[in-house]
Amino acid sequence: LGKTYNNDSDVYNHFSSWIRKQNLKDGDLISELTWFLKMFNKVSGRDFKITKELQQRFATQFAVGFSGDEMKTAVHNLYSSSVSNKFHLQHSFKFATPEYLLKDDNLNKYLNFRS
């Protein structure tokens, strides 16, 4: 507690070591990430793959404690056709990627998106 991290890589490395201390397997994180990406691809109608950057961003958000239902709500809101989602509508959702959603506070932003 009270430890600060310089970047997402530091958080990811700390989280991986925390998982091992909790007797969880790295595979548990991968299975959660696989579920997330499959759900994201279904909602978006796209075919994103797991990358190192995606793993790091997912691990960071997973460590914060976002649930699967919250992530699913955020993905649906990201792909909303509401006029409040003007930027993504104008760009045909080109920038609406898993990495974008998991970046910084975007997951929280889209979880609480109001149309």
Image: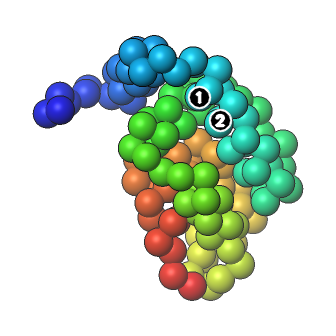
Quadrant in the picture for the N terminus: top left
Would you place residue 43 above or below residue 60 in this image? below
Give the class, few, some or many, for how many residues have Cα within 10 Å of label 2's Cα (few <14, many ≥20): some
Return the residue nearer the eye: 35 or 96: 35
* Residue under the image location 62 percent in, 26 percent down: 28
Q: For the image shown, how many numbered marks are present on the structure?
A: 2
Tag 2 secondary structure:
helix
Would you place residue 82 above or below residue 9 in this image? below
Q: Amino acid at mark 2?
A: Leu
Would you place residue 107 above or below residue 3 in this image? below
Would you place residue 54 above or below residue 38 in this image? above
* Residue under the image location 45 percent in, 64 percent down: 109
Separation (CA) of disc 1 from disc 2: 6 Å
Whole-percent x and y of residue 76?
68, 67
Whole-percent x and y of residue 5?
25, 27
Q: Residue 19: which numbered mark, if any?
A: none
Q: Amino acid at mark 1?
A: Leu
- Badge 1 vs badge 2, beta-carbon distance below 8 Å: yes
Whole-percent x and y of residue 7?
33, 28
Left or right for 14, reference 6:
right
Which corner quadrant of the image does residue 70 belong to?
bottom right
Which corner quadrant of the image does residue 34 belong to?
top right
Give the class, few, some or many, for how many residues have Cα within 10 Å of label 1's Cα (few <14, many ≥20): some
Circle 1 is placed at which residue position? 29
Circle 2 is placed at which residue position? 33
Left or right for 106, reference 38:
left
**The residue positioned farthest toward the front in the image shown:** 23
Quadrant in the picture for the C terminus: bottom right
